[in-house]
Image (spheres, rainbow, N blue to C red):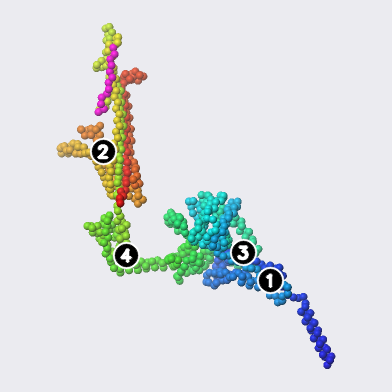
C-alpha cells in the first residue's frame, strides 16, 4: 500500500515538471517590433473613367493618380451608373491594418504598443485666396493660385479684341490685394483681380495678338494656370508618372484578351455665357453662320459596341444634368466611338443615327421617334384649328391715322382665320375687323406697326453756272504816196492803202479802237497808218436754288422760268402761235431708310434762251439737265452733276510770206484770239423735317 502511494507521488511530480518545461520554453509568439513603421496612406484622385460593353455587363474602369491599395469607397447598386461614396478614412484604415497584422495570443511585458498611422485629414472647402505666385520656365510661365482649402468649381473662357483669358472661381473671396499683377514675361501683360458677389474673377491680359496656348490644373488647395509651351512639358512628365504608378501599384488581375478598354470619359468645362460680352460674341457668331449649330455642352469621350440606346441616353443625362425621358418606342442598339465631343453634339448624332427627335421643356428632354413627334405636332395643329372653329367671333373697329385704310386692308386680311373678315369705312378711314379674339389682337398690333407717321423731307438744290469769256482782235491798215520829179507811187487799194487788215469785233461786241497817224518826208509825200485793236472780258455767275418739301415716297416738283412764243405753220396752211418752255425745274422722290439715310430719285433741269443763235426772231434754247438716284445722309450735301467746257479759238489772217517776216510781219496781218469757259455744278441737300415740341 505504501509503495503504491510513493509511485503515485512520483508520477505526479514528473507530470508537473513536464508541464513546467513546456511553459518555460522559447517558442513564444513574436509581436511586431516597436520601430516597424506602418505604411503611410496616400490620397488618390480620379483621373479617368472608361466604359466597356461586354456580353452580359458593362465594365467600368477607374484610374487614379496614385495606387488604389484598399478601396476607400462603396458601390451603390444602380442599373446603369455605379456611384462612388466616400467612407471615413479612419475606420477603413483601422480595419485594413487589423486584417494585415496577425492577432497576437500572448504579449510580453515591457513591449510598447504598436501605434496606428493617422489618416490624412480631408481638406475643407476653400473660402479665400491667400496668395498668387509665379513660376517662370524657359518657354512657359505658371501662375499658382493658393487658397485656404480645396478649391471648388471654376469656369474659363477666352475673349478677343484684346485677347485675354477669364477665370472665374466660384464661392471664394480673397485676402490677396486686388491691384493688377504686372510681371515681365513674353505672354501675359498683367493679371486683374475682381471680386463679385458669388465668384472671384482673374483676367489674364495677353501681350501677343492671339491668346497663347494655356493649361489649367487643379491640385487640392492650388490652381495652376500655365501659358506657353505647356503641352510639351505635360507630355514629358506623363511617362515619369506612369513609371511611378507601376512601381506603387499592386498587381491586378489581367483583363481578358478580347476585352477592349475605351478611352476615359473626360469632362471638360465649356465656357458658360455668364458675361454680357461673351453673349454678344456668341450672337455675332450665330448671325455670321446661321446654318451651323453651336454646341456648348461639356465634352466627353465614349466607346460602345452594341450598347442599348436607353443606357446611352441615361449616361448623357448624368453628364448634362438634364432629365431625359425615353418611351417604349425608343429601342435599338448603337455602336460608336466619340472622342472629346460636347454632350449636346453627341446627343444630336445619336438621335440622327436612330431617326429620333427630341422636345425640350425647361430642364426635361423627351426622346421619341421623328414620326411620332410629327404626328403629335400635326394633332396639336388640328386641335388648334378645331378650337378656333368653335370660338365666338368678335367685331372690332381699328382706326387708321396716317396710312390709308384701303392700303392696310390686304395685310390685315392675310393674318385672319377662314371665318374672319375685314371691311373699310372710307369716310372715317377705319377698319372693321371680325374674327376670333386672338386674331383681333394680332390685327391691332399689325395696324399699329404699319400705321406710323410718314416722315417729311425738305430737298434743296443749288445749280451754279460760271461763264468766263475773253476776246482780243489786232489789225493794221496803211498806205503811202511816193513822188519825185516826174514819177509818182500810190497805194492800189481804196484811199491809197496798200494793206487793209483792220480789227473786226464780232457782232454785239462793240467797235475796235483805232490809232492812226500820217508821215511826210522828202519823197514820201503821204504815209497813212492806222492800228486797230479790240479786247473784251466777261465773267458771269448764275446761282439757282430751288427748294421743296414732300412726304416719304411721294414725288414733288417745282418749276420757274419763261415760255417763249414762236410761229408754227400747220398742215392746213394756217399759222399758229405756240410756246416753248425755258425754265428751271426740280423733280424729286425721297425715301427715308430705317438707318436714317435718304434715297433720292432726282431730275434737275435748267433751260435758258440763247440770244447768240436766233432763227426768225426766236432764240435757241440752252438746255442743262441731270437725272440720277443717290443715297445721302440726313442734312448731307452731295454734288450730283457737273459739266466743265473750254472753247479756244485763234485766227491769223494776212498776206502770205510777208506776214511771217519777224516783227515786220505785223504790217501785213491781223490776229484774233477767243477763249470761252463754262462751268455747271448741281448740288443736292436733303433734310428730314422733325417735329418741334
The N terminus sits in image quarter: bottom right
Depicted 298 relative to depicted 605: above or below: below
Give residue 66's mark: 3
Q: Position of residue 190 (x, y in %)?
A: 53, 52
Find residue 114 and name its label: 1
Q: Position of residue 89 (x, y in %)?
A: 60, 69
Q: Quadrant of residue 656?
A: top left
Residue range highlighted in magenta = 508-520
Residue at horizontal 31%, vertical 59%? 446
Q: Residues within 10 Å of mark 1 (few under 14, many from 20)?
A: some
What is the secondary structure assignment of the residue under circle 1?
loop
Residues 529 and 692: in front is: 692
Q: Indicate whether residue 198 is drawn in magenta.
A: no
Find the distance from the CA under tag 1 to the CA under tag 2.
122 Å
Camera-side residue of 239 and 26: 26
User: How many C-alpha atoms fall within 10 Å of the one at disc 4: few (<14), some, or many (≥20)?
Assistant: few
Q: State which tag comes first along the sequence, 3 or 4.
A: 3
- Whether residue 646 sits left or right of residue 152 in the image: it is left
**Residue 633 at what x, y percent from top left?**
35, 46
- Label 2, residues with CA under 10 Å away: few <14, some 14-19, many ≥20: some
| Lower position in the chain sequence, tag 3 or tag 1 | 3
Regarding mark 4 in the picture, which secondary structure is present there? helix
| Residue on which disc 2 sits | 607
What residue did someone put label 4 on?
438
Whole-number angstrom distance, CA of label 2 to CA of label 4:
60 Å
Q: Position of residue 433 (x, y in %)?
A: 27, 62
Q: Main secondary structure of the magenta part?
A: strand
Calculate the distance from the C-alpha at mark 3 to the C-alpha at mark 4.
66 Å
Amino acid at each position: 500500500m505504501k509503495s503504491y502511494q510513493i509511485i503515485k507521488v512520483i508520477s505526479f511530480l514528473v507530470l508537473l515538471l513536464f508541464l513546467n518545461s513546456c511553459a518555460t520554453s522559447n517558442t513564444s509568439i513574436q509581436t511586431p517590433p516597436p520601430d516597424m513603421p506602418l505604411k503611410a496612406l496616400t490620397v488618390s484622385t480620379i483621373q479617368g473613367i472608361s466604359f466597356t460593353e461586354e456580353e452580359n455587363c458593362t465594365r467600368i474602369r477607374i484610374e487614379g493618380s496614385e495606387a488604389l491599395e484598399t478601396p476607400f469607397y462603396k458601390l451603390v447598386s444602380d442599373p446603369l451608373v455605379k456611384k462612388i461614396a466616400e467612407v471615413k478614412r479612419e475606420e477603413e484604415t483601422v480595419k485594413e491594418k487589423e486584417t494585415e497584422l496577425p492577432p497576437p495570443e500572448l504579449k510580453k511585458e515591457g513591449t510598447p504598443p504598436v501605434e496606428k498611422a493617422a489618416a490624412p485629414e480631408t481638406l475643407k472647402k476653400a473660402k479665400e485666396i491667400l496668395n498668387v505666385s509665379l513660376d517662370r520656365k524657359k518657354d512657359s510661365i505658371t501662375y499658382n493660385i493658393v487658397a485656404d482649402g480645396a478649391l471648388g468649381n471654376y469656369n474659363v473662357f477666352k475673349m478677343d479684341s484684346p485677347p485675354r483669358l477669364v477665370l472665374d472661381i466660384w464661392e471664394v473671396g480673397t485676402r490677396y490685394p486686388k491691384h493688377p499683377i504686372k510681371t515681365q514675361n513674353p505672354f501675359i501683360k498683367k493679371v486683374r483681380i475682381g471680386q463679385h458677389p458669388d465668384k472671384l474673377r482673374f483676367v489674364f491680359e495677353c501681350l501677343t495678338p492671339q491668346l497663347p496656348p494655356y493649361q489649367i490644373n487643379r491640385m487640392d488647395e492650388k490652381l495652376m494656370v500655365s501659358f506657353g509651351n505647356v503641352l510639351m512639358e505635360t507630355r514629358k512628365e506623363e511617362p515619369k508618372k506612369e513609371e511611378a504608378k507601376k512601381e506603387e501599384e499592386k498587381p491586378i488581375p489581367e483583363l481578358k484578351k478580347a476585352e477592349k478598354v475605351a478611352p476615359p470619359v473626360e469632362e471638360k468645362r465649356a465656357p458658360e455665357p455668364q458675361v454680357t460680352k461673351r453673349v454678344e460674341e456668341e450672337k455675332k457668331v450665330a448671325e455670321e453662320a446661321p446654318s451651323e449649330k453651336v454646341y456648348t455642352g461639356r465634352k466627353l469621350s465614349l466607346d460602345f459596341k452594341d450598347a442599348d440606346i436607353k443606357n446611352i441616353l441615361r449616361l448623357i443625362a448624368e453628364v448634362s444634368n438634364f432629365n431625359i425621358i425615353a418611351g417604349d418606342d425608343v429601342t435599338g442598339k448603337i455602336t460608336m466611338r466619340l472622342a472629346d465631343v460636347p454632350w449636346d453634339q453627341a446627343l444630336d448624332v445619336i438621335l440622327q443615327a436612330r431617326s429620333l427627335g427630341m422636345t425640350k421643356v425647361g430642364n426635361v428632354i423627351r426622346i421619341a421617334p421623328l414620326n411620332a413627334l410629327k404626328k403629335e405636332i400635326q394633332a396639336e395643329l388640328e386641335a388648334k384649328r378645331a378650337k378656333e372653329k368653335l370660338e365666338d367671333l368678335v367685331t372690332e373697329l381699328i382706326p387708321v391715322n396716317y396710312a390709308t385704310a384701303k392700303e392696310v386692308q390686304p395685310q390685315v386680311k392675310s393674318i385672319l382665320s377662314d371665318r374672319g373678315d375685314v371691311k373699310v369705312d372710307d369716310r372715317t378711314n377705319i377698319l372693321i375687323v371680325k374674327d376670333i379674339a386672338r386674331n383681333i389682337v394680332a390685327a391691332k398690333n399689325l395696324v399699329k406697326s404699319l400705321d406710323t407717321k410718314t416722315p417729311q423731307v425738305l430737298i434743296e438744290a443749288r445749280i451754279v453756272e460760271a461763264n468766263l469769256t475773253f476776246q482780243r482782235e489786232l489789225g493794221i491798215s496803211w498806205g503811202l504816196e511816193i513822188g519825185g520829179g516826174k514819177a509818182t507811187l500810190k497805194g492800189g487799194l481804196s484811199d491809197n492803202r496798200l494793206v487793209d487788215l483792220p480789227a473786226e469785233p464780232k457782232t454785239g461786241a462793240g467797235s475796235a479802237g483805232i490809232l492812226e497817224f500820217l508821215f511826210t518826208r522828202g519823197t514820201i509825200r503821204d504815209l497813212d497808218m492806222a492800228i486797230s485793236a479790240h479786247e473784251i472780258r466777261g465773267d458771269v455767275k448764275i446761282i439757282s436754288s430751288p427748294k421743296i418739301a414732300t412726304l416719304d415716297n411721294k414725288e414733288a416738283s417745282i418749276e420757274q422760268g419763261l415760255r417763249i412764243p414762236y410761229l408754227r405753220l400747220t398742215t392746213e396752211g394756217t399759222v399758229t402761235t405756240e410756246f416753248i418752255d425755258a425754265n428751271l425745274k426740280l423733280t424729286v422722290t425721297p425715301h427715308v431708310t430705317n438707318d436714317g439715310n435718304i434715297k433720292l430719285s432726282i431730275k434737275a433741269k435748267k433751260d435758258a434762251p440763247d440770244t447768240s443763235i436766233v432763227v426768225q426772231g426766236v432764240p435757241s434754247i440752252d438746255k442743262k439737265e441731270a437725272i440720277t438716284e443717290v443715297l445721302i445722309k440726313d442734312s448731307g450735301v452731295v454734288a450730283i452733276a457737273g459739266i466743265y467746257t473750254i472753247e479756244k479759238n485763234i485766227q491769223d489772217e494776212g498776206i502770205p510770206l510777208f506776214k511771217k517776216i519777224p516783227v515786220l510781219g505785223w504790217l501785213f496781218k491781223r490776229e484774233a484770239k477767243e477763249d470761252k469757259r463754262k462751268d455747271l455744278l448741281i448740288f443736292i441737300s436733303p433734310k428730314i423735317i422733325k417735329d418741334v415740341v
